[in-house]
Structures are given as C-alpha cells and as structure tokens.
Amino acid sequence: MNILETKNLHKVYDETSVPVYAVNGIDLTIKKGEFTAIVGPSGSGKTTLLNMIGGLDRPTKGEIIVNNVKLNDLSSRKLTDFRLKNIGFVFQAYNLIPVLTAKENVEFIMQLQKRPKKERDKRTISLLEAVGLGDRVNSRPAKMSGGQQQRVAVTRAIASKPQFVLADEPTANLDSKSTENLLEIMEELNRKEQITFIFSTHDQRVVKKARRVITVDDGKIVKDETRDPEKD
Amino acid sequence: MIWSIAWRNIWRNKIRSTIVLVAITIGLFAGVFSTGFYKGMADMRVESGIKTEVSHIQIHKPDFMLNNEISLYFDSSNQIVSRINEMESVIASSRRIEAECFFKTAHGTRGVRIVGVEPDREKKVTDIFEQMVEGDYLAGDHRIPRILVGKTLGEKLKLKIGSKIPVDMVDMNGNFSSKLYKIGGFFETTNKGFDERTVFVRFDQLQQQLNLPDNAAHEIAIYLQNDANIDIVQGKLQEKFPQLDVKNWRQIGKELALVTDSMDQYMYIFVIIILLALCFGIINTMLMVVLERTKELGMLMAVGMHRAKVFLMIILESIFLSLSGGILGIIIGYGVIKYFEDTPIVLDIFKGFEHYGYSSKVYTNLPPEMALNIAGLVFIIGIISALYPAWKAIRLDPADAIRTD
Ligand SMILES: Nc1ncnc2c1ncn2[C@@H]1O[C@H](COP(=O)(O)OP(=O)(O)OP(=O)(O)O)[C@@H](O)[C@H]1O
Ligand SMILES: [Mg+2]
C-alpha cells in the first residue's frame, strides 16, 4: 500500500538573482513499513524534499499525495492539522521544548491531538521505557545527552501514531555510539510497530541500516536501491 | 499545557525576566501608592469639607444659593428643624442666617460672609467648635455679642481676643446697620480660604441686626449618619418641603464634588502612563524572546501546533510576566497604603495646600476595587505588549525557522 506518492515534484527558490532548483522533478512512492534513507551531497535537495513531503513547504510544481490526500490543495491551517495527525518529525536539533520534561515533551503532541489523559500517560511511559529512558521521564532536555534527547524526539514522533516519521539528519549531532543506539531503536519500532521511517543522512553507518536507499543529486533521484541490510 | 509552558518560559532567562519584573513591580508600586496617597488627600478634603463647612444636606429657599439675597428666607424654621430631626438617618440639623458684611478694623476693611448659628445645634452638625485655636466657641450671653474669626483673617487684621469691631451690613429693609461685636475666639480649619472668608455669630444676634422676623432662617444644615443613603434622604426631604430647595454637598460644594469625581480619573491616567512606559520594556523583552526561540517556534509549528496556539502562548507569557510584577507591586503598594491609613504621612511641602483645604497630614486610602481595576489594566497592558511580538512569531515560516542558525 502506497502511503506517499510524489509526481514530478519541483521546488525552485527564486528570491535570489539566480534561481535555485532545489528539487527538480522527483517521482517517488513510499509503501507502508519502509525504512528508507535519502542520501546525497550537501545542497542536493534532501531537506527540501523532506519538508515538502511533510507538508512544511509547498512545491513550486508537481503533486504530493499522502494517504490519498493531495497536500497541494490544503490551506495552511489544514496543513498544520495534517502534520499533527499524519506525520512525525525528528529534526537534527532543537527538537524538544526545553522547559518540559521528557514525558511532557512526548505527551505534548498527543495533547495537541486531544488524546485522553489516561491514554497519554500510559503510552508515554511505555514508549519512553521502550527506548531505554524509563529513568529519565522527569528530566528536562538540558539534563540529557544529545542521544537521549534524540530518543525522546523519536518517541514523540511515533507517540502520535503518524503515517510515517520524517527524520532529517537525526544523527548528525551524535557520537557513533548514540547513533548506533538511535538506529537500533528506530529499526525496532519499524519492525515491531510497522512504523514507516524516512530519514536523510550523510553517515555511511546509518545508510547501511536502511532497506531502501534513495540517492539524490541536484534535486533529482539518481539511484534508488532496495536491499537486505542484514547481508552487508 | 501551553499555560505551563508559558509560565516556565519566563524563567528561562532569569536575569532578564527579573529585571522586567522588578521594573513592573516598582512602577505599579509607585502608581498604586500615589493613587492611595492622593485619594487619601482628596477624601480628607471632602470629609473635612462636609464636617466643617457644608454638612451633608442643606435646605434653602429656592434661588438663595444663586445670589444669597437676604430676603430669601423661610418661616417656621424651628418647626422644620424638629420635623427633620425626627427623620431616619438624620443625626442633627441646625438653622443658619447668612449675610455679606463689612468688617472694619484699624488695619483694613474686609468683606466677609457672616453666619449666624445656634451653638448647641450647630455643634452637632459641623465641627468648627473643635477647631478653636484660641478663645471659646459662641458660649453664653454677653452684653457685647461675640464673633468668631478665622485665624488667618485674625492675623491679617491683627485682631486679638476681646478686640471690639463694628460689623456693617444692609438689613432687610435696605437700611445701613452697624453693630459692635467682640472677638470671642479664633478657629482654624484645614481650608485657609474658608477661614479667611467666614465669620460666625449667634443666630439671634444676626437675626436682630438684619431685622429678620422671628423664626426666619436662610439655611438649615443637616448632618446624616453616613453618606451612603444621602440621595434617599434628600428625596424624602424634598417631598416633605416642596417649596424649599434641598441640595446635597456635591451640589453645594461644587469644588468638593470635583475633587472626588476628577481624582479617580486623574489617578487612572497616571497609572496608565506608568503602564505605557512599562509596555515598551515588555515589548522589547517579548521581541527578544521570539527572536531567540525562532527555531523552537518553527519546530512547534512544524509538529502541528496551530498559529493561534503559538500566538496565545506568547501572549500568556507576557501576561504572566506583567501580572506577576504588577500584582507584586500592587500588593506592596496596597500594604503600604493600609499602614498609612491610620498613621498619617506628614509632609511639610504640602503646607501650601492648606490654603485650599488640604491637610498636610495625609491618611492614605485606596478602595480595593481601584486596586483590582489597576490589576485589570496590568493584564490588558500584558496583552497589548505581546501583540506585536506574537504577531512576529506566527509570521515565521516553520521550514525557514528550523533552517535558521
Ligand atoms: N529558503 C531557501 N532559499 C533559497 N535557497 C534555498 C533555501 N533553502 C534551501 N535552498 C537551497 O536549495 C538547495 C537544496 O538545499 P537543501 O537544504 O534541501 O539541501 P540538503 O541536501 O538538505 O543539504 P545538506 O545535506 O547540507 O543538508 C541548496 O542549494 C540550498 O542552498
Ligand atoms: Mg539538509
């Protein structure tokens, strides 16, 4: 089942004198349960692509269809709602609200979704335990390591039961041990809960874990390979 | 949860928030305290105006107030007083005769207002008898009738207790009348102007000098248990004595009424000016907040927080900041005012105001509802100050905001 489809997707930044063709005709389909990496050199258009898929940015040309909804047609208000209900985000940094504890950060989105308190509490605690943060439930981000913070961010992203999770270079600020740890957690959530992950990365160790690797350059897909990561 | 986020956000930059908070606290303390101070001053002016000069209600023949024409007297004044004294809420009433007279002394001639009072009744209506600084209140019968003069007038005309002075006026029949009085005492009220313009003699003496009929009076002053039901009593009196003109102290002492009516407005204007000044500090702080948190705000909008919520969150933070400082300032100000409610603040620089009836001893006063209204103003200023910063925040494009470094 396709949960995401883009058709002839373009993004041109033309505020400057020379227009930048950040995304230049991308056709892409993602199926439920994928664990997909988007790779490519700096400036190749990874972030721009992810932002458009996630409904954060609007394409200059082309279509984005998520779960049978055409994002192009949505108003800014509807788009916000759409993101809240369908997409989990993990950014490179500044993922968490500094004044909230780990638990509150995870709960926050479920609260915006107006989930009942009981459900929120239960799910938050069990998820934080699952990512190995059972003892950091009441810690604020400043008291946690970068790796722990990213684990909280992943937990928050999946807590809301999204269609898929978009992670733009989630490990860029992490050391290798934390990177490995975060990837393991993402893989496990992908396997056990059938959560679809789409992440961009520069890191070859991260690329190795992906089951599908899409390489972009100059705003175009230049390679799209599906493989069994276990064989590597 | 955005309430708790907004509150906790204030304390992210402790030093900056504390500075703003202290500024608001000081500003509001100043505003509240001065309000209480001037309100206390105004209240005392009104209270002494009622107690010493006008009392609560006065009754005259219609038009008497316009030109003080001595022929505008009314009869049966004694019976009227008895009927008034039977009424509920009335403590006492007293008859008066009033005229313009000339006061001739070796040191000059003065035109003053002479008031004939019934000492025993008058004591229950006004407190001039308590304001004697020298001599006695109009007590007893004397061969030469006594006259009471204000201390300032006495000093200006170099009068002494026992000095004899002729008082000239035109009587009921249009004839010139001169009568000798002896200074019986000097009074000093908080209103120097009043002291300089007014002299007192006994009712019967002035009646005689003016050639007024027995039982005639120009004025009946009425003192009530309190000011609260003055309108009801006034209405009843007017019903009882339809041919007479019943007026309350607000209508009589226009300047007294002005003091109470305008004081509140002035104080609110004063507080609003303070708040506007503080407003710029809050705007500045909130703009810095939005600027510092660009990435975070972008993230919040990206993960699905609606712009309206982001807007509200910024507004709430500003309200919390303003209100915590504001309420602290109001509480401290109110506490200080409460303390000086019973212990007067004595200020020599206010001596000059005594001429206008203001005491240099000030008992502060602030009605609780005024403090609440000021808190309400702080709340509104908190909102207003955050409007522009919050608008800036929601104008952020989440994708751009997250990219910024
Ligand atoms: N808001 C913008 N205005 C103008 N140009 C932009 C904007 N955002 C991105 N670009 C340009 O679009 C191109 C693609 O940028 P993008 O951030 O998508 O690349 P990327 O693959 O994510 O790079 P990196 O690996 O460094 O994160 C770049 O040339 C970039 O300079
Ligand atoms: Mg990027």
Image: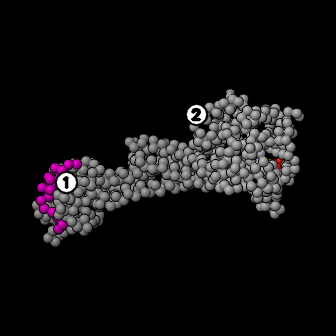
| 3D distance between C-alphas at marks 2 and 1 | 76 Å
Given residues B380 and B224, the one toward you in this image is B380
Residue at the far right in the pictured view = A232
Three-letter code for the amino acid on which mark 1 is drawn: Ser
Determine if the magenta segment contains residue B83.
yes
Q: Secondary structure at mark 2?
A: helix
Q: What is the magenta range?
A: B70-89
In the rendered image, the vertical position of residue B290 relative to residue B252, given as above or below = above
In the rendered image, the vertical position of residue B277 relative to residue B212, given as above or below = above
Residue drawn at (40%, 58%), measured in percent from left and top? B262
Give the quadrant of residue A109. top right
> Circle 1 sits on which residue?
B94
The quadrant in which the C terminus of chain A is found is: top right
- The answer to whether residue A117 is left or right of residue A170 is left
Given residues B311 and B293, the one toward you in this image is B311
User: 10 Å neighbourhood of mark 1: few (<14), some, or many (≥20)?
Assistant: many
Q: Is residue B155 visible?
A: no
Residue at the far top in the pictured view = A135
Q: Is residue A36 visible?
A: yes
> Circle 2 sits on which residue?
A118
Residue drawn at (77%, 45%), measured in percent from left and top? A30
The quadrant in which the N terminus of chain A is found is: top right
- The answer to whether residue A82 is left or right of residue A29 is left
Residue drawn at (50%, 55%), measured in percent from left and top? B272
